[in-house]
Amino acid sequence: MPLSHAQLWKAIDGLARREGLSASGLALRAGLDATSFNPSKRFGAGDPPRPRWPSTESLTRILQATGMSLGDFATLALDAPERPATAPMLGMARAGEDGFFDDAGLPAGDGWEQTELPQPRDTLFSLRIDGDSMVPLYREGDRVLVDRDATRVRKGDRVVVRTTSGETLAKELAAITARSVTLASINPAYEPRTLARRDIVWMGRVLWVSQ
C-alpha cells in the first residue's frame, strides 16, 4: 500500500526522534541542507496548500545515515501515531530577525515551534460577525470559529453567548461567577453587559477569526 504524504513526513519526524535529533539535525547528519525537512518545506503555495514530498535522494540519504532499512522505515510510517495538525509558530519579536523566513515569505530555518490547530469535533462551528461592538478586533463580515465546550471558557476569553431571549453575542468575558457573567465590548461605544447564568443557553470560546 502506498504511503501518504502525512505518513512519510511523520516517519521522518519519528526517525529523527528515534535518533535523538530534530528534523533539522537529521537532515544535517545525512549531509542535507538543515532546512530540508522543515515544516515550511512540506507544503507549497496555493489554496489549499500544495503538498510537497521528500525526494527519493533525501530519503535514501537519511536511511544510510541512520542504518535503517526501507522496510523498517515503511513500518515506522504506518505505525506513526496521528498528531494534531500544527502550524509553525514564532514570537513576534523574533519574527523581525533575519533567518526565519525564506525569499517567498514562508517559515524557514530553526527556532520555530508548533501551534496546534483546532481538530474537527462536534462542539465546533463558525459564525459570521454582524455589527460593530467588537471593532477593531472583529469587523462585520469576519468569520469566527467557536468551541461550545464551556469547560474551556475563562475570564479574558473572546466568547460567543446565546441568550434565552434569542440574542447571539460576540464579546469578551470580563467576569464570570456561579450566578452571572459580565460581557465587555472592544468598541468603547458599547457598555458592558451582565447576564444571569440562567439567561444563557450556551457560551463558547472563539478560537480563530478569518478576516
Image (cartoon, rainbow, N blue to C red):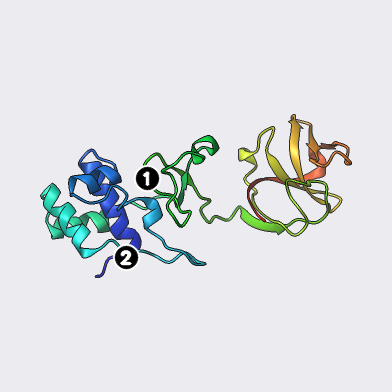
* Res 4 label: 2
79 to 187, vertically: above or below:
below
* Residue 189, quarter of the rendered image: top right
* Res 150 label: none
Residue 11 versus residue 38: which sits nearer the camera? 38
For residue 63, side relative to residue 83 (left or right) = left
Determine the CA span between mark 1 and mark 2: 25 Å
Q: Nearer the viewer, mark 1 or mark 2?
A: 1
Identify the residue shown where x is 25% and y is 40%: 21
N-term mark: 1 or 2: 2
- Image spot of residue 30 (x, y percent): 18, 49
- Label 2 CA crowd tier, 10 Å (few <14, some 14–19, many 20+): few
Mark 2 is on which residue type? Answer: Ser
- Label 1 CA crowd tier, 10 Å (few <14, some 14–19, many 20+): some
Residue 56 appears in the rendering:
yes
Q: Which residue is mark 1?
A: 109
From the image, which quarter does the C terminus lie in?
bottom right
133 to 45, vertically: above or below:
above
* Residue 125, quarter of the rendered image: bottom right
For residue 63, side relative to residue 200 (left or right) = left
Secondary structure of the residue carrying tag 2 is loop
